[in-house]
Amino acid sequence: MLLAGSWRQRDRFNEFNIFLLIDIPNKNFSKISFFISGSTSKCDRILISINKKVPCMPQYELREDNKKAVISLGGSLINPGEIAVDFLKKFKVFIEKRVAEGWQFIVITGGGAPARQYIEGASAIMGKEIDKNDMDWLGIHATRFNAHLMRTIFRKIAQPVIITDPEKDFIDPEKAIVIGGGSEPGWSTDYVSTAVAARINAPYVINLSNIKQAYTEDPKKNPNVKPIDNIKWVDFCKIVGDTWEPGLNTPFDPIASKLAKEKNITVLIVEGTNLENLEKLFKSEEFVGTVISN
């Protein structure tokens, strides 16, 4: 898409012709070209040219004909070290507002600080004798504890029993919210979220965590990394790799990424604490985040 405009500025001593050209070749960036030409009382001719690429925020249109969404709720939002009471109060209001608009949610909770503390504590005590299966189960139980907390918060509108098996557990289609936690060793809550989305034919997983977007590398290791607005699954899988271990810190689990690619599920990575930005997503407005799709 190409947008152009021009105007003339003139007074007794100066005359300028100003041209503005905005080129939007794709959804990832706009190219702005700004030209000024003219003359002043002190200079016969002036020519200024500015070309700049300006990143575009992603925009994703949620489907009105399928108001089902799976939310992968990062455990760091629920319990970053202690229960995040203020955030959870606001999150409750936000979800209840969406439910009033006709949305149905399955919320799969992560383990947060308790999961890391148990895994790190067990590893420090057991050393090399620690079994990966045991590490997984420590994380799984932490996610289920968080799931029970969320089920309690939404008890008036939520299915009364949390789900722990995304493929077999009963999901009540009449309930506005269903809460779940981790399932079994080798499956992260990102994977559980994706498996549930595939099962109920939800077109997207909304991944809420404490990061604003996905990045080309780990920003903690490289401060010069670039944020990703839109990316294809084939390229995202190259970034995150193809293995997962308990406690792995990636924007979206590599194994879950493979499943999402296979099932054609779009994942939307959004900072969970910025609920105003999240609301823009639900209004199909430009938002800060990352869209991963086929």
Image: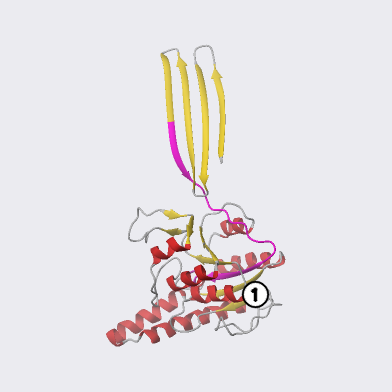
Give the x, y percent position of residue 114. Answer: 44, 78
Q: Is residue 266 above or below residue 181?
A: above
How many discs mark residues in the rendered view? 1
Residue, x 52% and y 27% (percent of image)?
19
Quadrant the N terminus occupies = top right
In this picture, residue 49 sits left or right of residue 170: left
Q: Is residue 61 magenta?
A: yes
Decide which of 220, 81 is in the foreground and name it. 220
Q: Is residue 159 magenta?
A: no
Give the x, y percent position of residue 214. Answer: 45, 60
Residue, x 43% and y 23% (percent of image)?
47
Task: Check disc 1 and give the amino acid type.
Answer: Ile
| Label 1: how many Cα within 10 Å (few below 14, some 14–19, many 20+) | many
Residue hosting label 1? 177
Residue, x 47% and y 81% (percent of image)?
142
- In the picture, residue 220 is in which quadrant? bottom left
Dot 1 falls on a residue whose secondary structure is strand
Give the x, y percent position of residue 20. Answer: 52, 31
Give the x, y percent position of residue 75. Answer: 49, 73
Q: Is residue 187 above or below residue 44?
A: below
Decide which of 87, 220 is in the foreground and name it. 220
- Give the extent of the magenta segment: 50-77
